[in-house]
Amino acid sequence: MKPVLALLLTKLVAISLWAQVENTPRNHSASAGAGKLFGRIVDAKNNKGIDAASVQLFLKKDGQLAGGMLTKPNGDFDISNISTTDTFKLVATAIGYAKQEIIIAFDRSANRNATAEKDLGNIKLTAESQYLGSVTVVAQKPALQMGIDRKTFDVEKNLSSAGGTGIDVMRNIPSVTVDVDGNVLLRNNSPQIFVDGRPTILTLDQIPADNIERVELITNPSAKFDAASTGGIINVVLKKNKKLGLNGLVSAGGGSPDIYNGNLALNLRQGKFNFFVNGNFNHAGGRAKSETYRQNKENGNIENYFNQFAFTDRKRQFYSIRFGMDYFLDNRNTFTLTQNFGGGRFTNNEDQHQEYYDINYVPEHYGFRTTDGKSTNERSSTQLLFKHNFVEAGKSISADVNYNHGSNNDNTSILNTYAYPDGSVYSPDSRVHNTGTGSNDQVTIQVDYVDPHGEDGKLETGIRTYINDYTSTFNAFSINNASEIKLPLSNNYKYREIVNAAYATYTGKLWGIGYQAGLRAEHSKFDGELVDSARKFGYKLPQQFKNLFDGLFPSLFLSKTIGEGQEIQLNYSRRIRRPDFWQMNPFVDINDPLNIRQGNPALRPEFTNSFEFNYNKTYNSGNFLGVIYFRNTQGDITRYSDTITTAQYQQLHNAAIDPSAILNTFVNAQYQNRWGSELTLQQKVGQQFDITPTVDLQYKKVKSNINNTDLSNEGFNWEAKLILNYRVAARSGLLNKWSFQATGGYESPEVIPQGKRKEMYGIDFGLRKEFLKNKATFTFNINDVFNSRKRGTINDTENFYQDSYRRWDVRSFRATFTYKFGKTDFQLFKRNNGNGNQNENMDRD
């Protein structure tokens, strides 16, 4: 930890010195007549500042752009280094407001060699509405905003996820799917999950949907982003209000099965401080079913049959509190401190019914297995951010430190009983007791620098250090006649992962073609150890100088406007996917005695070369994005299944593992090629209805040979998602301000090395009513309307054929009430009239 603190101290001292040099008074004689304009853009109706309004300054004589910016959260803006001898036209615009234009001139009798400042006061924008018959339509941002490099999804407009978790949000986003274990996939790949642009220890089901402002999808990240993002990046941006005064939101909800939730968010903005706090509680239950049908084979011939039916009562309980503050030291320096505490309580009570048949499908014996599992986890996250904006527009340097800590405890009791068809005892009962603990610490230190070069150029560079320490202890005991025998599958495991990185990208324009070229260099090291056996494993990249390319990750983006509202882009990036803890941990999961799971410590990272061609067209009533992509992955990490060996069965015999159990693990294939095309349309139909269909077509080829067994496979698959939104905007009446949303998704069968995944589909529905002058909303949603969302797999090998499915959730109903409140003139700290000039300059009413 000492090297980390030393590195942090060095970086902060360097930044502090840089900021001091930048803020040192300058000799203005070199820029005679330098002027500054400042003011605030406000709503004409309530005088509240408008965030992210566009302010542009043009020379009146020839219309040339002289400066501009987006307003701060309280509506403030300032434009510096402009001539005091010219006359200007200021144009202020914001979504949903009418444009405002002002002619500006400085006092020309003032000293020309002095810096002149002009306060424009409050510039008021009027809300722009239009009437269509008896319907009032006010401009709104669409739920999905599509760009060439990313898609941004507005979670507030996602009615189906209100009162739920981040998993519910992901199910209703184009291009994103959720598998049976709650893992999120982006174009059938595992993306890297960020929260507010930084790595997180939280899982998506631990993040309340009501805390999420928007979700950003980056399918082919540039060199600026972490190289371990082969499957793209999903960035979850949490809500943090910065409006003046005191603002808050409270919500409560409930539903079935066994669902209830509550949320409280408060924000106070006064002077140089912005305080925020958020607390959330979420509880959900459900009884899910899974089925397995297997044929056990010898040399390809069926020997016997096995069926299994399981019912699992799952209860999940999450809680979190997040608080922090922004400190605006001055117009150019901001500190932000954020702290998050959270945790979860989970119970899983499962009943398994097992049927064993001979070759003639005559029952031989039956099994019954009960599992009582309880687990808890605690999570905390601390982030300190500093940002300095230079005098030059767009030039900035930022530094941040993130520390994440997590711990978990698991306790499971398993009872196995067996009987002949006549009810007599087939074999003695078997009892297993499992306990486990784990601890995880992550530190990320990052510095980023942005330097614009003219109108089209920009240099971005930065450095990053990531350290991840993990320890895990798992003990399994066979209980017979009140005595415990420790099983071989127990393990004590720990690892440390370190990734040091530096990047540089340059954005420019040449011959009408925009480009961004970048290079990221990473040095990574993974040291794992099985403490009980002193067995060590891991990797280091690059291994030595001749393997230097293993640590280099270039990217190139080319774009060109080909017509009004039309743009094309071609991009390339090289990425790495490092195996995660569960894929490498040799821990054996025996919750299902016929389908056990184990990690592979010998896994190596995979490398992906990714190419994309994008076409984006924006028109009056919508937007279309077409993508063609190709990915070549060397050393593809993939699942591998086989029946357990005699030696493995003998080791696990006391754990009540079946002799024909299947061991599921992970291996490195030779390569995987994936060709695909993704088509997304966002179309408005009239003023109240919009439709967003997405189709992703893929052809995948896997080349793999494990233990002299050819596992190669190839095939075509596709996914589709359709989002329908309808908003009633009558001028009055019972139906006024009702919104309706329906989301449907379908995933076709997909090839895997030893078989295929079966199709999956589901529909979600939500409705919302706004009332009390839009301060209150009532939301009702149904997730998985037809209770059809389940993940099935078919495995077909020389040793077995298995058709199975599992479920993550069941159909649920939820109603949520939300109320927003605020007071713009609320003051926690009273101003000192004698010394309040600086605050008054920042908070003019």
Image (spheres, rainbow, N blue to C red):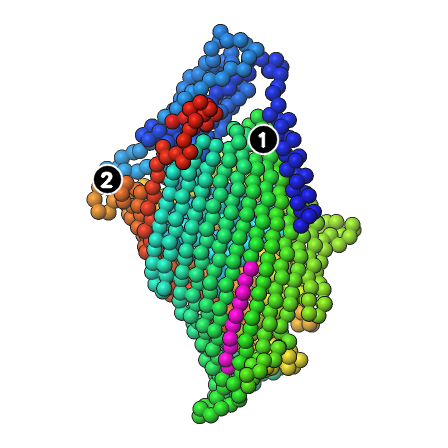
Residue 512 in the image: above or below residue 101:
below
Q: Provide the residue designation for mark 1.
A: 395
Find out whether residue 408 is within the magenta segment. yes
Instruction: For label 2, count other residues whose C-alpha is less than 10 Å away and answer few (under 14), some (14-19) or many (20+).
Output: some
- Towards the viewer: 246 or 642: 246
Count up the numbered dots: 2
Residue displayed at 35% across by 36% down: 823
Q: Which stretch is magenta?
A: 407-416
Residue 266 in the image: above or below residue 32:
below
Position of the C terminus by quadrant: top left
Q: Provide the residue designation for mark 2.
A: 731
Q: Position of residue 771 (x, y in %)?
A: 27, 44
**What amino acid is labelled 1 in the image?**
Lys
Instruction: For label 1, count other residues whose C-alpha is less than 10 Å away and answer few (under 14), some (14-19) or many (20+).
Output: some
Q: Position of residue 314 (x, y in %)?
A: 43, 67
Q: Position of residue 245 (x, y in %)?
A: 39, 35
- Main secondary structure type of the part rendered in magenta: strand
Residue 633 in sight here: no
Residue displayed at 59% across by 37% down: 398
Element under disc 1: loop
Q: Is residue 93 left or right of residue 195?
A: left
Q: Is residue 492 left or right of residue 337?
A: right
Find out whether residue 128 is within the magenta segment. no
Element under disc 2: loop
Q: Earlier in the sequence, mark 2 or mark 1?
A: 1
